[in-house]
Amino acid sequence: MESSDPKISADPIVDVAPGSTASTVPETPGLAPAAHRSWWRTWSHAARQILPMYIAWHIVFALTSCFAVLFTQPDFTRKGVPLYMAWQDWFRWDATHFRTIATIGYDWPWRTAFFPLYPLCVKAWMVLTNSPTSPLRGELVVSNLACFVLFIVFYQLVCEDFDEERARRAMFYLWIFPTSFFLVAPYNESLFICFALLCFYQLRHGNWWLAGICGFFASLTRSTGLFLLLPFCYEYLRQRDFSFTSIRLDIVSAGLVPAGVGVFALYCYDRFGDLLAFSHAQAMWAHHLHGPWHGLIGSAKAIIISDGILSFQSQRNLMDLVPSLFILVMIILSIVGPWRMPRTHWSYCLYAVAVYIFLQLFPIGGTGLFPLQSQARYMLELFPAFILMAGIGKNKTFNLYYPLIAASVLFFLLTQYLTGHWVL
């Protein structure tokens, strides 16, 4: 069945090397692959492209971890801090919950708000290395390995769907996003985004069962993995010219995407007698259902009624509101305007719109003073926004100001996190 993608021709790709005869390479259903490379050469090339920046990124974070000690020590003190504290400082906030789940399992229903795949991977690392008392090391290893794979897949996906220049820029823009340090912290962000990108890559290549398996693992890591079902269905139909008569048995593979949440729901029922324990647990963090505009407006109001622009209330809300609005603008521009994505790439838009709306539906209640708490971290999951951002990045002004501003805020938030301040 021919695809409607204008990038793909019904004719095979012809690759003619100097001094050789033409050879034909069959097309892949969803994307035009790098036909002149073998599978190994393709992925090793992607790994080589991201490795220098990946290493530099970790060096910067390691140096920041060491220098952050200066924010906790009085001037001219003779007292030192053990070197291991530089990586122990990464063990904060949600990392403690993942540690508990990895070591003793789900002891209370409210802890089911944290989905199981990440702590299961940490547990597997502890068993394989025979280190039952060091879950932090396992958390850091899992997060950083997933982060490495994440960027390889992200680079290759954007490279095949757009071009290499845009892939490098998208990768760089994600690297310096103000909350990108959560990709290497003991959180499940990198593992989720890794599987979400793998799912997208397999979708674009028409590998439905592999895409379903990746979607299964994504939804077993975070509930937002459910929304991979939308791009799955769109890509499946698009690659069949939206002809329902072309639907085959492999459409069943789409059911694997929500199956991750289904499996966890069954576990919750068996363990606590509540099929939706993970949803009900959100009340412990004062998450309540509202319109998608509620948190954005509430955050703006909290800034207005604060004790001034330099107050804690105002600054913390700005740190949540500005990234949320910035990513929202990127998503809108991916649908309308000069940088909008073509119809063949609407699967990116569907995923971004659905996940963004879902994240905005459950702002923080309680005092109502910080309704968008953690939203800046969640924006990392909206990788299509960074692809769109990379397209805008051809503009020299944008390509100058975004890295300067984003990297500055990244350094500030990282030092806040490492010194125990409220950065979730």
Image: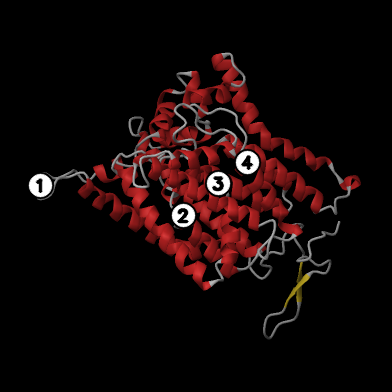
Upstream in sequence: badge 2 or badge 1: 1
Q: Is residue 193 left or right of residue 122?
A: right
Name the amino acid, label 1: Thr
Q: Nearer the viewer, mark 1 or mark 4?
A: 4
Look at the numbered discs 4 and 3 and tell me whether their residues touch, using CB distance below 8 Å.
no
**Residue at which label 2 appears:** 177
State the separation of the CA atoms marked 2 and 1.
34 Å
| Kind of residue sitting beneath label 3 | Glu
Q: Which mark is residue 381?
A: 3
Residue 289: percent from left, percent from top: 60, 29
Nearer-N-terminus badge (3/1): 1
Provide the secondary structure element on which disc 4 rests.
Answer: helix
Q: Quarter of the image holding residue 95?
A: top left
Q: Nearer the viewer, residue 126 or 357?
A: 357
In the drawing, what numbered circle is on residue 77?
1
Looking at the image, tell me whether mark 2 or mark 3 is earlier in sequence order.
Answer: 2
Q: Which residue is mark 4?
A: 357
| Camera-nearest label, 4 or 3 | 4
State left or right for residue 28 relative to residue 414: right
| Classed neighbour count for the residue bearing mark 3: other residues with Cα under 10 Å, few (<14), some (14–19), many (≥20) | many
The Cα atoms of the two marked residues, 4 and 3, are separated by 13 Å
- Residue 305 is at least partly visible in this image: yes
Q: Earlier in the sequence, mark 4 or mark 3?
A: 4
Residue 146: where, in percent of width, then height? Answer: 49, 47
Q: CA distance from mark 3 to mark 1?
A: 42 Å
- Nearer to the camera, 287 or 3: 287
Q: Residues within 10 Å of mark 4 (few under 14, many from 20)?
A: some
- Badge 3 element: helix
Residue 45 can be seen, yes or no? no
